[in-house]
Amino acid sequence: MLDVMAHRGPDGRGVVEDDGAVLGHCRLAIIDLVTGDQPMRSRDERLVMTFNGEIYNYLELRQELIQQGYAFATSSDTEVLLYLYDCYGPECVHRLNGMFAFAIWDRKERRLFAARDRFGIKPFYWVQLGDAFAFASEIKAFRCVAGYQPRPDPDGLAEYLRFQFCLGDRTLFMGVHRLEPGHTLEVEPAGRPSIKRYWDLRFDIDTHHTEAYFIDRVKVLLGDSVRFQLRSDVPIGAYLSGGMDSSAIASLAGDFLGGRISTFTGGFREGPTFDETSYARSVAKRIGSNHFEVFPTAADFERDIARLIWFMDEPAAGPGLFPQYQVARLARDHVKVILGGQGGDEVFGGYARYLACYLEECLLGAIEETTDPSRHILSMSSMVPALPTLRHYKPMLQHFWRDGLFEPLDRRYLRLVDRGTAIQELYQPDFLTGYDPTEAFREIFNRPGIESLFNRMTFFDMRTLLPALLHVEDRVSMAVSLESRVPLLDHRIAELVMTVPPAWKFKDGRLKHLLRRAVEHILPEEVLKRQDKMGFPVPLVQWTAGPLRDFFRDTLLGREARERGIYRVDAVERLLDHESPFGRDLWGLLCLELWYRTLDGRSTRCP
């Protein structure tokens, strides 16, 4: 298992065997490079821990534990976490500020305790094979466990075809579960795991404070989060896309470090629609960073995509996976830790589909002359200045309104996030299961206690899309042995933003209004006022019609794919010639086909 995941930790490895339990660890050394090896034992030999991630407030926790009589043999955050559990037991998770997936074996109680961070930044998978319980950071490691055979999960496939990610604890592999974000797990030898949620998003709206108060609190907490996450004993850098999120993080980090930071960005030469490097250069110039750029090509895509699906274990989210990997590889040539802006769209509300959904709601509100603030927090006139943000999203709007208007809110948002509009056309009928994920979607979207449409949309995305994007972030960084940190996902920031009245979070239809106001003093004006939100688009449709035409046809229409018997060949042929701009159907087909190939006996070695 350690051999399969060696890319995650090339700096050392260890194994601890005990009666009934074996723990292993591949180390990527970031803090305490000399004495922080794992698995780590407590001084009395009772506890053994393997830990993936970083505890950013470990210095403060260490001082608390010293005052309670604990003595430390290392300067690592690992030892702090180990003794925090010794002191507080499972309740220790509430005191952690960080990204983590860890497991602690209690030799005396013969019990394994595991936990995953609040947002799912770090992965944790588990399987139960008879009386044996196994866990790992990557699914491919289970191929080494006796009795495990990788098989597709039909329900997981149904969810992937609809959303390009799975819901809840489900994966694309039968019997393989993910420990969901904000959950703990306990299991004893030959027992079944007991799983509990220890943290969740709460939308207890604060009507007592002003908008200015919330802007100031975001500013303070964001600065504190970046300061925490700059703790490292190895070189640190920052992603810099040219968007507001990564620009804010890079700017704060650069200010803290006096400009002594490297920044990394990527773009495509296929035209301005696929290149925002000019914005990144503007930010890099302001903070005085050592700036690096990469421009991936179609040849890079053809060379790397099968490897990326292997690293991913299961495909998730969109084609941004490919350029993210290229930028991560560039960054790893210069640093070992990277800060990024992941999470800003989900926490602060940055997706253009939010604007599309409210455009329809404002139209309905104007027609009905309703002023219900739980639904219509905007008027048509107030959101008009924000509409240019939708300039590049006309295909999305056409799809959104194609089959009517003013349906129930859950049905409307499902239409915006549903990636499976061509499922019936592209796949053979016997491949599609009877399971329909619609009800699972509605259960999440219609969670009790969330009144406003804006909060329902962001809650669904934080519960489902965000873990999928963090899956991508983890895999592309770990593929090159790079630690990726995401300061916008400090839980204190999310907890604050969830209490803000929706009318202030989406003021006048401006996406990420609170964050924009909180960082306006540190960003160049051209970045702050951008309305051409990109999100690292990939010229995949252009490549499919040009340099990658043969690659896509050979992969999706070749003998191996035809013999698999799950695609409608004629429909795939039509799609190859008529994929819509920024369409995701071809991407979903390619990822699924390459994923199936990892099931054909090659998933313990990289292609």
Image (cartoon, rainbow, N blue to C red):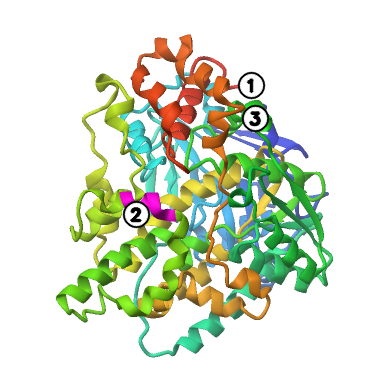
Q: Kindly report the distance in space between the C-alpha atoms of the residues bearing marks 1 and 2.
A: 39 Å
Q: Residue at x 51, y 48 (%)?
A: 469
What's the residue type where badge 1 is placed? Pro
The magenta segment: 393-398
Q: Give x and y (percent) for residue 259.
A: 82, 69
- Please report contact status of discs 3 and 2: CB closer than 8 Å, yes or no: no
| Residue lying at 63% horizontally and 69% vertically, measured from the top left | 527
Residue 28 percent coordinates (x, y): 73, 44
Q: Amino acid at mark 2?
A: Leu
Q: Determine crowd level at label 3: few under 14, some 14-19, many 20+ residues with C-alpha closer than 10 A.
A: some
3 or 2: mark nearer the eye: 2
Q: CA distance from mark 3 to mark 2?
A: 33 Å
- Does residue 528 lie above or below 298 as drawn? below
Q: Which residue is mark 3?
A: 304
> Disc 1 to disc 3, how far (Cα)?
9 Å
In the figure, is residue 528 to the left or right of 124?
Answer: right
- Image point (27%, 41%), residue name: 437
Q: Nearer the viewer, mark 1 or mark 3?
A: 3
Determine which of the numbered discs, if any, sits on residue 397 in the image: 2
The residue that mark 1 highlights is: 607
User: Which class describes the residues within 10 Å of circle 2: few (<14), some (14-19), or many (20+)?
Assistant: some
Camera-nearest residue between 525 and 445: 525
Indicate which disc, 1 or 3, sits on the residue closer to the N terminus.
Answer: 3
